[in-house]
Amino acid sequence: MSELLFEAHHLSKRYGQNTVVDDLSFDIAAGECLGVIGPNGAGKTTTIRMCLGLTVPDQGTISALGGSMPRDALSIKAQLGVVSQFDTLDPDFTCAENLLVYGRYFGMKKAQIRERIPKLLEFAALSHKADAKPGELSGGMRRRLSLARALVNDPRLLMLDEPTTGLDPQARHLMWERLQLLLQQGKSILLTTHFMDEAERLCSRLLVLDHGKKIAEGCPRDLIAQYLEPDVVEAYGNGALALAESPLKAMAARVEVSGETVFFYTQDAKPLLDALAAHPKLRTIHRPANLEDLFLKLTGRQIREEG
């Protein structure tokens, strides 16, 4: 079994009458990417803040990298790399200077940091932007610079809070490529994300949170197999909604409606697809069940507002 770098036991956090994190336990093994997913208000960011020692849990314990929070916070943080939801780059410094100044916070010598800067910029595909300031960079470039900065101290464990939010598809894919490289190098990652394709690509294990509680945990494909039928047929277009209460409903194990689309979850899609062929005005999609289906089944389709 791989060495455990991080262990959280029975974490709870309340603000007034609101329980934001409720008896949460999990661990992270060496070389593993643990994904934390859940709707807005599920407790993901509060969990990350407790892991970083920025928020003190009301109950529970955290042990990490040979120490315990908050007693050994300084020695633990020296082995962590952090990318927060929002950019915290210094706008007055160039890319290279941002890395240099950040490295100094860890007590690293200037010569040691300067030696690392070219490789970090190369990793972030920013070698040509060493003398540019963050305001001159695209959103994707700033996120990659934030990741490079988090690697200045050569951390064993990275904590990434929604690192690709706001990026276009090309920028997200480049960020995923860089995170995959880090995993191949043996780094461990704790990742919160709203993107189910991101979680499925990067995470070896998932933690699903809702209302501060852990409602599921496991490998992405195992969770999909455990909670879902293997085939999904989506039907939309003129007359689609009527199908949800038609005889076709009996051909699926479960039927859901979201907006103008009817979702049929089934063990065998062929009879259903044959029947839908009699409705040529409808548009249909046949696909395997995915992580988004799992997320919606476990947490519901109702939109959660921030805060």
Image (cartoon, rainbow, N blue to C red):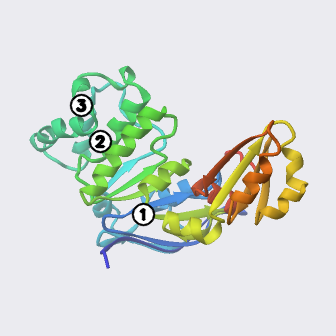
Density class for disc 2 (Cα within 10 Å; few <14, some 14-19, many ≥20) is many
- Residue 147: quarter of image: top left
Residue labelled with disc 1? 204
- The front one of 133 and 169 is 169
Q: Earlier in the sequence, mark 2 or mark 3?
A: 3
Density class for disc 3 (Cα within 10 Å; few <14, some 14-19, many ≥20) is some
Instruction: Name the mark nearer the viewer: 2 or 1.
Output: 1
Q: Earlier in the sequence, mark 1 or mark 3?
A: 3
Image mark for residue 97: 3
Question: Residues under labels 2 and 1: Cα distance?
Answer: 24 Å
Instruction: Name the mark nearer the viewer: 2 or 3.
Output: 2
Residue type at mark 1: give it.
Ser
- The front one of 169 and 35 is 169
Name the residue at the bottom extreme.
Answer: 1
Left or right: 203, with 156 as reference point: right
Residue type at mark 3: give it.
Glu
Disc 2, SS: helix
- Residue 157: quarter of image: bottom left
Residue type at mark 2: give it.
Arg
Left or right: 52, with 1 as reference point: right
Density class for disc 1 (Cα within 10 Å; few <14, some 14-19, many ≥20) is some
